[in-house]
Image: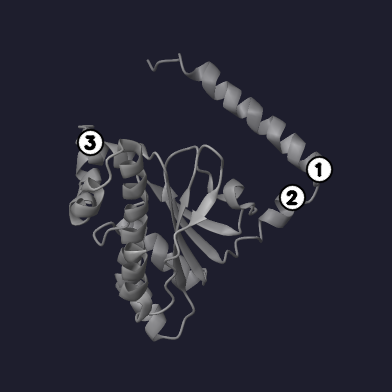
Amino acid sequence: MGNNNSKPDLERLFLQNRQWIRSVTSADPDYFSRLVDQQNPEYLWIGCSDSRVPANQIVGLKPGEVFVHRNIANIVVHTDFNALSVIQFAIDRLKVKHIIVVGHYGCSGIAAAMNNTRIGIADNWIRHIKDVHDKHHHELCSIEEENARLDRLCELNVLEQVINIGQTNIVQDAWANGQTISIHGCIYRLHDGLLKDLHTSISNPQELHDRYRAQLAS
């Protein structure tokens, strides 16, 4: 027999779902009928799985206005077919114009990588962040304060993922075919809700490394 200890918690979720439906439809009776035909996003948001960083709410967009992919520490690597499939679907089928990588300060996945904290199977995923750390070892070691060093690694991780996305054959082919796609790097501050532009927007292959190097030098 299964464990029924979680049933009251699930019942609370179902109850809150119905309360949410009543609240939404009382304010907007056509909300759900309009939502059915609203999957026409201009943005693909690649963010962290952290539940404190909800894509729609942060930027004030409605459901259907942003396509979302999330994982630990907002990583995009060329062997992750989940992320690559999302990117291709967003570009080829949804025709998004912007791909936004959104990290956040104080990311626990990045902290685990920086501090060599063992987690378990996720260590294999976090290894990608350690690669970012190793690549920028000199800069990071020059930052004495630990929280400031973590913040900078969070930023550097976003910048690396922007480059990784731009290097995918999916984006390269889209650019070659004349499709308008820009890749942006941003980072979110949990303590005040501010979304910060990291000024690494890339719209063509020529900008791919120039913008990256310029941001590192700033």
Q: Which mark is residue 27?
A: 1
To which quarter of the image does residue 112 belong? top left
- Residue wearing tag 3: 115
Q: Nearer the viewer, residue 118 or 34?
A: 118
Question: In the picture, which quadrant includes the N terminus?
Answer: top left
**Label 2: how many residues lie within 10 Å, few (<14), some (14-19) or many (20+)?**
few
The residue positioned 35% from the left and 70% from the top of the image is: 214
Q: Amino acid at mark 3?
A: Asn
**42 to the left or right of 30:** left
- Residue wearing tag 2: 31
The residue positioned 58% from the left and 64% from the top of the image is: 41
Q: Position of residue 194 (x, y in %)?
A: 55, 47
| Colouring style | one colour
The residue positioned 71% from the left and 30% from the top of the image is: 19
Q: Position of residue 115 (x, y in %)?
A: 22, 36
Would you say the residues marked 1 and 2 are in contact, meaning their CB atoms lie under 8 Å apart? yes
**Label 1: how many residues lie within 10 Å, few (<14), some (14-19) or many (20+)?**
few
**125 to the left or right of 27:** left
| Mark nearer the viewer, 1 or 3 | 3
Q: Amino acid at mark 1?
A: Ala
Q: Amino acid at mark 2?
A: Tyr
Instruction: State the SS at label 3.
Output: loop
Q: CA distance from mark 3 to mark 2?
A: 46 Å
Is residue 8 something that shows in the picture?
A: yes
